[in-house]
Amino acid sequence: MGPSVRIASVFPTSVYTVVVPNSGALSASLREAIVQRSAGQNGVSRSNVGGWQSEIDMLRWGGEAAASLARIVTEACRRLTANSDGSTPSVAWRPEMWANINRVGDSNQNHWHPGSYLSFVYYVDDGYAGSADPALGGELVFVDPRMPFLRMRTPGLRHRVAGGNVEEQETWVRPFSGLLIGFPSFLGHSVRPYHGSGTRISIAINMIARTQ
């Protein structure tokens, strides 16, 4: 008889889904501001492969809709964080916000958001036009932050997790219009190439924490 083995998971990485009230009206206003901005300004190139990406100053030109989204994200940060003793932290959250437009073939390389504590992405338009076809791609991909170490010598080897399952090293999230998803800024992430015929619009927000 072999040894008795128990499996416990430690140091999990949380990913948050936030319900956005009245997301349809909010998205319509955000879309109008982003389309207008992209028509009059060249985009920047950071993690994006193709597509259009604004500077991180959307709160300056995005109007009340951008300010409203920033308030929703700030409130989410207050609810999703705590002091080490479990008490409510006294933190000033400073948002940085930018817009993204992706069309057919566009994607984002794997990257991180250094300097911020939490990061969020809001999908103004998923670009799927109601289709569930997985061939359209465009999934948000989260990458296990430990993966480079696990793959240094044994690229095919995996740990078992609670329940005896084999752990994942990537998690794909298929977005939908109105989705607001948050995650620790250290978590590597990318966007798979989008193969739809529409226009995908999203907004990224970095939340920088300053203790008061």
Image (spheres, helix red, strand yellow):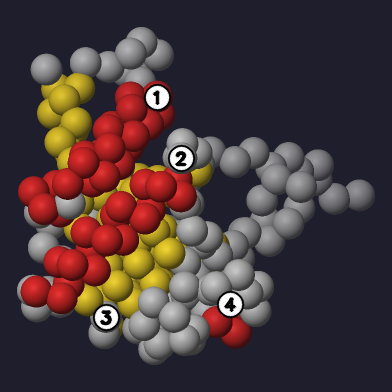
**Residue that label 3 marks:** 51
Q: CA distance from mark 4 to mark 3?
A: 34 Å
Q: Secondary structure at mark 1?
A: helix
Q: Quadrant of residue 149?
A: bottom left
* Among the two numbered marks 4 and 3 on one chain, the one whose residue lies closer to the N terminus: 3
Depth order, front residue of 87/47: 47
Left/right placement of residue 127 relative to residue 50 reads right
Q: Nearer the viewer, mark 4 or mark 2?
A: 2
Q: Nearer the viewer, mark 4 or mark 3?
A: 3
**Residue that label 4 marks:** 156
Residues tagged 1 and 4 counted as in contact (Cβ below 8 A)? no
Q: Nearer the viewer, mark 2 or mark 1?
A: 2
Q: Secondary structure at mark 4?
A: loop
Q: Residue at x 52, y 60 (%)?
A: 176
Residue 116 appears in the rendering: no
Q: Nearer the viewer, mark 1 or mark 4?
A: 1
* Among the two numbered marks 1 and 4 on one chain, the one whose residue lies closer to the N terminus: 1
Q: Position of residue 88 (x, y in %)?
A: 33, 13
* Among the two numbered marks 3 and 1 on one chain, the one whose residue lies closer to the N terminus: 3
Q: Residue at x 26, y 49 (%)?
A: 205
The amino acid type, in three-letter code, at marker 3 is: Gly
**Residue that label 2 marks:** 22
Are there few (<14), some (14-19), or many (20+) residues within 10 Å of tag 3?
Answer: many
Q: CA distance from mark 3 to mark 1?
A: 33 Å
* Among the two numbered marks 2 and 3 on one chain, the one whose residue lies closer to the N terminus: 2
* Among the two numbered marks 4 and 2 on one chain, the one whose residue lies closer to the N terminus: 2
Q: Position of residue 150 (x, y in %)?
A: 47, 66
Left/right placement of residue 23 relative to residue 54 reads right
Depth order, front residue of 36/92: 36
Are there few (<14), some (14-19), or many (20+) residues within 10 Å of tag 4?
Answer: few
